[in-house]
Amino acid sequence: MNETSSVKTKSTPHFAAATLAILAAASGAWATELTPKEVMSRSESSRKVSEITATCKLTQTTKGKDAKLKSFQWWRKIADNSLDYRTLVRFTQPAAVKGEGILIVEKDKAENEVLLYLPAFKKIRRVENQQQTGKFMGSEFSYSDIATPHLDDYTYSGGKQEPCPGKTHSGVACYLIEAKPASPKIQERTGYQRTMNWVRSDNFMVAQVEYFDLENSLIKRLEASDIRKVDEAHSKWMAYRTEMHQLKTGNSSLIEFVTAKVNGGVPESTFTQQNLSRSE
């Protein structure tokens, strides 16, 4: 199941404006003007799935080299505070990384706990707050990118509407929101001075994010696609394809959900150091 069916448009300002006017009239999405924080609050709610069990693929594309594929299992569950997630990633292929695991435990005050398990050394290593800008398994995603962004961790501005970027979001209007870390600790953990977020006006899922480093240079771009409603009763959505582009090098990394089951029951014991160190 893909996103809202696409509509081909001519790239002229008048046509784009007319398209947005038609979309607004048809959907009523802009009948009530939303503040930037309200838009991001709806986005947070839209993607807040209580539990996920999935199998995934990570494809790393390096300019001038063959693409590298890694497979992994993914478990995620929200905590009792209905805000912070626990995420366990365990790699299954290729053989060189089989059994390697990553446990991310989100906490308040921007101090997420990230633990790595390397079966070759039979040790668990902690990734400190300032090191969470490092590459997630050698990809263009950082550890902080994999963690879930929280509404109150940022301040917001902007909110104008424009056509969503990307062919897979054609015919959909997006809110354009700037987000800045609300504290130096959050900025240290993420390594970003700010992000620009394109948020769909129909389901409030993020279509694209641009990341600016601490010198305010644009360094990465995330593109989300194959957005599916995974919880009909609570109107929750997931992007089954998320691709991160490193703009300076031309390298990219794609995370794809191959299978996903939501709210199927993930035991608390999944997110323990004992379970992390299992090599299977």
Image (cartoon, grey):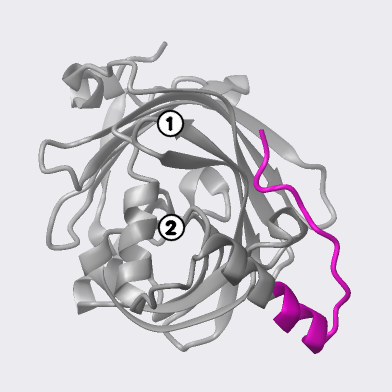
Mark drawn on residue 68: none
Q: CA distance from mark 1 to mark 2?
A: 36 Å
Write down the residue under mark 2.
Answer: 134
Q: Answer yes or no: is residue 75 visible.
A: yes
In terms of depth relative to the viewer, which is nearer, 160 or 166?
160
User: What amino acid type is highlighted by mark number 2?
Assistant: Gly
Residue 178, placed above or below residue 77:
below
Horizontal side of 195 relative to 3 (left or right) equals left
* Earlier-in-chain disc, 1 versus 2: 2
Residue nearest the observer in this picture, 179 or 248 = 179
Residue at point 85%, 84% (across, down) = 12
* Magenta-drawn stretch contains 2: yes
Q: Residues within 10 Å of mark 2 (few under 14, many from 20)?
A: some
Residue 17 x/y as whole percent? 71, 83
* Magenta stretch bounds: 1-19
Per the image, the residue denoted by label 1 is 232
Q: Amino acid at mark 1?
A: Glu
